[in-house]
Amino acid sequence: MINTLRVMDVERFATKDGPGIRTTVFLKGCPLHCPWCANPESQSASTQLLWFEAKCTACGACVAACGQGARTGGPGQKPLLDRAKCLRCGACVEACPSGALQLSGADRTPASLLEEVLRDADYYAASGGGVTVSGGEPLTQPEALAEFLSLCKEHGLHTAVETCGAFAPAALERCAPWLDLFLFDVKSADARRLAEVTGADLAAVTANLRRAGALGREVVARVPVIPGFNHDEASMRAIFALARDCGVGRLDLLPYHTLGKNKYAALGRAYALGDTPMLTRAEVQPWQQLAASLGLDARVGG
């Protein structure tokens, strides 16, 4: 049986997902449901259709292409989408001339992904970069992920994984030999609040954070700073104490942003945080100073 990874996207020349210039491979499927997620199409492991209505020119090409009656509409009208009828076959995506339709979720072999990421090997070497696998939660696909990472290491590439921490310990054991860096989400130290808002089990996430640190690899805690969730001194102090207790000395503080907000509408979903404004770097800097006072190396941004 050939291992495949369910891939959401491949981003070349990424600079916020680890050191240097990198290629970031985004996988689909995540056990959490963070309401601020910038990649909501990564939460489901299934293939999904995104319709960006603002790009739609009402040309009717998708209506003609759909054999299931999922797209309906008259001449000059933006078509309706019946997701219950949609088979996510991609016919409408191929027919759309404006890029208003996108299909998220393709099965890729580790070898085909390696071929793609090696296109920029010279840039990795010159900048100290490499490959980062993000998501979704990459460690929910451990067998194919381990194969991909091992291929990357065979070619001398620096490897990183960005994880929410909600994975089976066996997945970490399977993939760890080929990982150089863990970018590990630490969202909250309040178990009840974390479970209520994101679905995460704090005890399990913390145990996995300790396991990652015990491997001797570099671990960076990534803290999304979210208004109404953890953007307060008590929450930040507790997060910093948890990170320090787990042996993590470096943290990236990630200001809340709404750059992925339009994807929710494209998926037919409501955005839970409504019109909550983005945080500026200046609004997050007090937490950077607090972390420094506690002996931690905290940086704003990745």
Image (cartoon, rainbow, N blue to C red):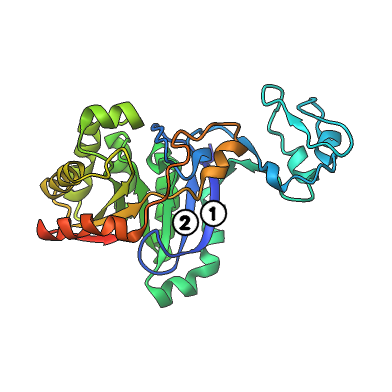
| Residue at x 26%, y 30% (from the top left corner) | 193
149 versus 235 height, above or below: below
Label pair 2/1, CB-CB below 8 angstroms: yes
Q: Position of residue 133 (x, y in %)?
A: 43, 51
48 versus 7 height, above or below: above
Q: Position of residue 239 (x, y in %)?
A: 19, 44
Residue 218 visible somewhere in the drawing: no
* Residue 91 figure quarter: top right
Instruction: Give the amino acid at mark 1.
Output: Val
Disc with the residue nearer the chain's start (2 vs 1): 1
Q: Secondary structure at mark 1?
A: strand
Give the number of the disc on residue 10. Answer: 1
Q: Is residue 187 left or right of residue 135?
A: left
Label 2 and label 1: CA atoms lie apart by 6 Å
Counting other residues with Cα less than 10 Å from the Cα at mark 1, is it few (<14), some (14-19), or many (20 or more)? Answer: some
Name of the residue lying farthest toward the right: 75
Q: Is residue 42 left or right of residue 249?
A: right
Q: Position of residue 216 (x, y in %)?
A: 19, 55
Q: Is residue 247 left or right of residue 85?
A: left
In this rendered view, identify the residue nearer to me: 45 or 100. Answer: 100
| Residue at x 48%, y 75% (from the top left corner) | 122
* Residue 201 figure quarter: top left
271 versus 293 height, above or below: above
| Residue at x 38%, y 33% (from the top left corner) | 32
In this rendered view, identify the residue nearer to me: 231 or 252. Answer: 231
Instruction: Give the amino acid at mark 2.
Output: Thr
Q: Secondary structure at mark 2?
A: strand
| Residue at x 41%, y 43% (from the top left corner) | 138
Q: Which residue is mark 2?
A: 24
Q: Position of residue 121 (x, y in %)?
A: 48, 70
